[in-house]
Every structure is written in C-alpha cells, then in structure tokens.
Amino acid sequence: MILLRKVRVFSLFILSHYAVKFCIGGDIITASEYIQDPGSIISSGGLYKLGFFSPNGTTNRYVGIWHNKIPALNVFWVANREKPVLDSSGVMTISNDGNLVILNGKKEVLWSSNVSTSGANAKAHLLDTGNLILQKQSSNMSTNDTTAWESFQTMCDTFIAKMKLSTNLRTNEKKVLTSWKSPSDPSIGSFSISLEPLNIPEVFLWNGTTLYWRSGPWNGKVFIGIPEMESVYLDGFTLVDDKEGYVYLTYNFAEVSYFSYFFVRSNGELLQPFWDEKYKKWRIDWSTQASDCDVYGKCGPFGYCDAKKSPICSCLRGYEPKKVEEWSRGNWSSGCIQKSLLQCARLKNGSTKAGKIDGFVKLENVKVPNYAIWSSPLEDKCQEQCLSNCSCAAYAYDAGVGCMYWSGDLIDVRKFSYAGTTLYVRVAHTELEGKRDLRAIIATAAVVATVIFSIGTFFAWQKSKKRGGKDGEQFSKASSENMLRGSLSKVNLQELVLYKLEELAAATSNFSDANKLGEGGFGAVYRGRLLNGKEIAVKRLSGASGQGLREFINEMEVISKVQHRNLVRLLGCCAEQDEKLLIYEFMPNKGLDAFLFGNIPFLVVFRPSIMEYQFMGKSSF
Ligand SMILES: *[C@@H]1O[C@H](CO)[C@@H](O)[C@H](O)[C@H]1NC(C)=O
Ligand SMILES: *[C@@H]1O[C@H](CO)[C@@H](O)[C@H](O)[C@H]1NC(C)=O
Ligand SMILES: *[C@@H]1O[C@H](CO)[C@@H](O)[C@H](O)[C@H]1NC(C)=O
Ligand SMILES: *[C@@H]1O[C@H](CO)[C@@H](O)[C@H](O)[C@H]1NC(C)=O
Ligand SMILES: *[C@@H]1O[C@H](CO)[C@@H](O)[C@H](O)[C@H]1NC(C)=O
Ligand SMILES: *[C@@H]1O[C@H](CO)[C@@H](O)[C@H](O)[C@H]1NC(C)=O
Ligand SMILES: *[C@@H]1O[C@H](CO)[C@@H](O)[C@H](O)[C@H]1NC(C)=O
Ligand SMILES: *[C@@H]1O[C@H](CO)[C@@H](O)[C@H](O)[C@H]1NC(C)=O
C-alpha cells in the first residue's frame, strides 16, 4: 500500500512538473514568468489573450483580456482601469506578497489584485473561459491549489458567459458591470448594471444613482421586459437564489464556437454583439437603445410607452394626462392621473354609498411596472387579492412567478407587439361601463364582418367547387396555408417549412407529457422525431396568448433574426385549427437541453413558496 501511494505521488509529481514546464510562457504568470509590454499570454485552448493594449485614441497602456480568435480587438476586462502605464515600461507579475500586480518602469504598483490570502508560490492562470485566476500553490500534494482571486469577480463593462452578476445582502457585496468613461478611457464611467434582489429579481441599468433601464422581473426563464428572450424556445440564462440574500445571474451558450457577450457602452447603451463568422464581423443582436421606450419611466406614472405608436406615450385606460398642455407638448414626465375615484377612495372621502366595486381593464403584451409585490402562486387569487387591498393599483399573472400586484405609481409600463405579460389595471366601475358600449360596437362590427366574410367564402367555395371539385375543408385549409406562405415570403422566411399538425402530433406522441422539455409563459416545448428521423423541438404557443396570424409571423421574423443567439435554428411553423406551433432544430445530447436541465442546479427561485409550486417538475429532466 505504502509503496503504491509513493509511486502515485511520484508520478503525480512528474506529471505536474511536466505540465508546468509545458505551460511556461503559455497561460500562466509567476514571479519569474512575468509579462512585459508588449508581451502576452494565451489560454491553453487558444481562446483568450491577456496582454497590454491601448484603447483607440490614446497611447496609455492597460492590461486587458480579449478574445484571441476573433480579429477585432474587443477587450472585455481591464486590470488597471484607473491607472494606466504612461509608457511602454509596464510589467504584470506576482509580487512578494503573492499578489498579481502591474508595475511601471519605476517599479511603482499601479494595480494589485489586493488579496491577503495568497502567499508565496502564487501563480496567475488564464483559463479558457476568459477568467484570470490567482492561485495559491499548495505545498501539500494531496490538496488542490486554492483560488485567491479571479477576474470574473471584478467585472468591468462586459458580461461574458459564466460570469456572475450578483448581489449578496449578507455581506452587502454587489458584483456589477461598470461602463468605461469614454471609448478611449477605461476608468469607471457613470453607467452600471446590477442584479436587484427585489421581491422578484431583475436587472437594473443605472446612470449614476438614477435608474435608466430595467429588464422587468425574472420569471424563471426570461425577463418579462425583454421580449427577444421569449422568442427563442430555450435560453441559456440561469438565476440562482440561495434564499438567504445571495442572488446571481449567469448564462452560457451550448456551443463554445459561438461567441457573443453583453456590454455597457460609455453612453449607457447595453448591447449584445455577436461574432458573425460568415461575414467576419461584429453585429449587434440586441440593444437597450433600440427605442425611446427603453428609457426608464419615459411616460411618467400611469402612462405606458408603445414604440409603434405616435406619440409613443399614452395614459393607461381609466387615466388621463395630469398636465394636459405639458403632455401634448410631448413632455410626459408628469404622467397621468385617475379619471374616477376608486371605491376605497370614495369611501375615504366621506361618501356614504360607495357604489359598485372596481373592475379591471386589460393591457396585453406589456413589460409590467417597476417594484412588483408578490402575492400568490394561484392565478384565480390575483384579482381577489388586488381588490381586497385599497393600495393595489394593478395586478398581473405570470406562470413562472404567480400573482404580482402594484401599489402606488405604475411606472415604466411598456407595450410590446408580442411576448410580455398581461397587466390588469384597476379602474372605477364607471370606467368599465364605457367599455361595455365599445364592446357592443365591436361585437356588432364583428358580426357584420363575419357575415360578409362568410358570404364571400361561400361564393369562393362554390366557384372552386365548380372548377376543381375540391371540398370545402380542403379549400379553407389551402387558403390559410397560402396566406401563411404569402406572409412568410413577404418577410423573407420562405425557406421555413410549413408542417402539418398531424405530422407534429405524430412526432411528439400527441404532445405527450413524456416528450415535454419545458414550459414557459408562451406555452410548452416538446421533443419530437419526424418520420424521416430528424429530431425536432416543438414550441406549442398557448391559446391563451391570443396570438393572431400576424403576431405569429412577427414572432417568427424576430426569431429568425435572433436565433443565432441561442443556436437553436427555427425550421418551420404550423398554424392549423387554432394551434400555432414553432418547430426548431433539436439540440443533441449535451446540447442546450442537457445544459439547461442537466447537471446545473436549475432555477432556484426567489421564494420558497414559488419554488415549490413552479419548479418541482424540473428535477426529473
Ligand atoms: C478609432 O477611432 C477612429 C476615429 O475616432 C475611428 O475612425 C476608428 O474606427 C476607431 N477604431 C476602432 C477600432 O474603434
Ligand atoms: C486593498 O484591500 C484593503 C482591504 O481589503 C483596502 O483597505 C485597500 O484600500 C485596498 N487597496 C487598494 C489599492 O485597493
Ligand atoms: C496534507 O493535506 C491532508 C489533507 O488535507 C492532511 O491530512 C495532511 O496532514 C497534509 N499534510 C501536510 C504535510 O500538510
Ligand atoms: C481537487 O481538484 C480535483 C479536480 O478539479 C477535484 O476532483 C477534487 O475534488 C479536488 N480536491 C479537493 C480536496 O478539493
Ligand atoms: C446621465 O446622467 C447625467 C448626469 O445626471 C446626465 O447629464 C446625462 O445626460 C445622463 N445620460 C443619459 C444617457 O441619460
Ligand atoms: C417637463 O415637465 C417637468 C414637470 O413639469 C419639468 O420639470 C421639466 O423641466 C419639463 N421638461 C421639459 C424638457 O420641458
Ligand atoms: C371629496 O369630496 C368632496 C365633497 O364631499 C369633493 O369636493 C372633493 O372633490 C372630493 N375629493 C376628491 C379627490 O374627489
Ligand atoms: C396592501 O398593500 C400594501 C402595499 O404593498 C401592504 O403594505 C399591505 O400590507 C397590504 N394590505 C393587505 C391587507 O394585504
């Protein structure tokens, strides 16, 4: 036994000795193997490079990390942001106290990893994830080196895969992103991005101490205020909450060859560039400055923003501009006020008869207001709970969250053309009565339209019957297919396949639970196999989402633009019998599905009560 162990220790020694030798000048920095401007080290897989660089427009020297395989320099991490080396005499090495340091020609310390736990024999190691770690070498063969410091823990302006945006309420520690001051100055600028452990966590982008943009609440899969996330069938984001004050957000892509990241520009824009291998250039996938509606609270309290409308701001139903003249000039900052008092307020104001109880008006596909209060996991409790609390101004339900309600100002409501959730705004009963009249008009119009359409269809059918003897069912099927095909070609999606519902039902064993991969606000995703053997993932949009054909096509257009984000290729669609389905390429084993439902502790969510009810089922994947 003893001999055996000795042999093992010996061979281990040889191995590590070789490994170290092999790595010298490769991916590590030690006291003797330092880097001197313009030197650099490269991670073992060749993906990332650490070295000296100058931003565009300055000769100052900084140490940064960038992607090594992609030609355009995109530094995502900078060590000495605040103190550049003013000439080319800079050195990055390990100091006597075991810290990673940057020295100038006069041996002045411009930057230090500044940790006390690292002793002698420390070494810095650039990993293939892009993380630079400082390891305290163990003098004991049977214990591993310990990581004393890592660059992923001191993020700059860029969020790359496997980084963690976190907040720890116990230690009051926040790992945030901070913008550069300007494109030529990496020092800390005025914009920052943090994960806020609100009742329901979300991401905030700050301009100093002013909220500038928000993601909307995390629903276990996506942020409710980012519809682009909802378009793809599964996303690589994970939010973990240990329920004791520590929350973090991280993401990963199933395929390492795909390279994309998030970064906050010095002008406050949060964007997601990705490397387009085909055209060999960076392209912007998503940005928080795509529309004026992205600015936090653009339309003031009780207003909502719709980028497709002109003007973009409107008051929520039951509300009117607080300052009409100001509002009409396009200064929406004062927002809107209630037209009629709610029941509680009527009682409070001394009215003896409170009249009828309040009701709710719906606003679909919205980014919900800021500062949601969580109330119940059960959908049928939402309305009741809102009505029973005088301070409740609106509520919403999301399958991933449960009931949310808001008291006080409803701020930063935004309407999207798809995704988002439905907001129910509380209004006095008098406001509802107006609605009923409108409903009657719409209903009448709908009846008239239906009659006209039926007559038209009947004659068309008669005609087609005379021509080709097709039966009626076939005719209507063919026409809806033609309509879909026509619409797809208009938005350049004609390469998509139109699948038949029966074909998809067969492929997924009739949408059986056994084939279900997951479920979100949009509906469920099933795994399936077509007759030709091809594996697919089928997203069955829930009927409740009330999507029309046009929204459906819009969504496909968006997906086809953003699908590279998650590397899930959209193959086609199906719209039959009130069913709307999207068909994606299935990610093979160890792909997205394994990654999402496999070994990573998936979705530990903010409240024990929510977690129990929503995510119980996931553990079986
Ligand atoms: C550097 O700055 C110049 C002038 O501002 C600009 O034309 C050029 O595109 C910039 N280069 C990079 C790599 O950003
Ligand atoms: C180093 O860390 C100590 C405490 O951990 C802190 O007081 C000091 O300001 C830090 N120094 C620098 C240069 O960041
Ligand atoms: C090495 O580590 C092992 C396990 O932690 C411990 O049992 C042993 O005593 C250590 N030996 C020395 C020489 O520190
Ligand atoms: C040392 O590292 C190896 C490989 O990462 C790991 O499997 C092992 O559990 C570690 N041992 C200790 C004592 O942390
Ligand atoms: C950020 O805040 C500063 C100071 O309050 C202001 O001057 C600047 O215009 C703001 N930037 C944006 C993009 O809103
Ligand atoms: C908009 O209105 C607010 C409040 O009345 C005022 O403080 C602000 O200066 C106005 N902004 C502009 C651009 O006129
Ligand atoms: C409250 O009632 C008084 C009369 O009873 C009325 O003048 C006042 O406008 C009411 N307040 C509001 C906010 O409507
Ligand atoms: C009503 O909502 C407010 C604001 O969230 C809360 O403080 C209060 O406890 C609620 N009241 C009831 C009876 O639930």
Image (tube, rainbow, N blue to C red):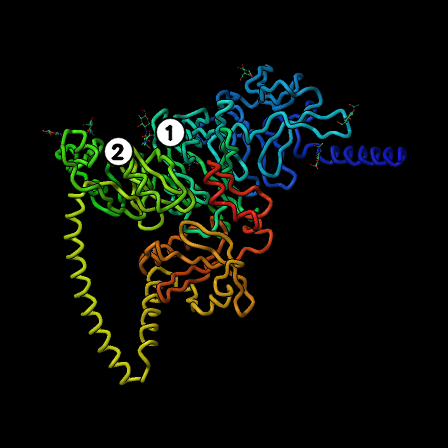
Secondary structure beneath dot 2 equals loop
In this figure, which residue is indicated by the disc labeled 1?
Answer: 206
Q: Residue furthest front?
A: 352
Return the x and y of residue 349 as percentages of the image width and height.
15, 29
> Closer to the camera, 504 or 342?
342
- Number of marks present in the image shown: 2
Q: Is residue 75 visible?
A: no
Secondary structure beneath dot 1 equals strand
Q: Is residue 467 visible?
A: yes
- Identify the residue at horizontal 47%, vertical 44% (top origin): 613
Residue 261 vs 531, above or below: the answer is: above
Task: Please tell me in which quadrant of the rendered image residue 122 appears.
Answer: top right
Return the x and y of residue 354 as percentages of the image width and height.
16, 36
Quadrant of ligand 6: it is top left
| Ligand 5 within 8 Å, label 1 CB | no
Residue 189 - label: none
| Ligand 8 within 8 Å, label 2 CB | yes
Eye-nearest disc, 2 or 1: 2
Residue 390 - label: 2
Instruction: Look at the image and tell me in which quarter the N terminus lies.
Output: top right
- Identify the residue at horizontal 85%, vertical 34% (top origin): 5
Q: Amino acid at mark 1?
A: Trp
Asked whether, in this view, residue 275 is left or right of residue 411, the answer is right
Return the x and y of residue 373 as percentages of the image width and height.
36, 34
State which tag comes first along the sequence, 2 or 1.
1
Return the x and y of residue 405 as percentages of the image width and height.
33, 37
Q: Amino acid at mark 2?
A: Cys
Asked whether, in this view, residue 546 is left or right of residue 63, the answer is left
> Closer to the camera, 124 or 473?
473
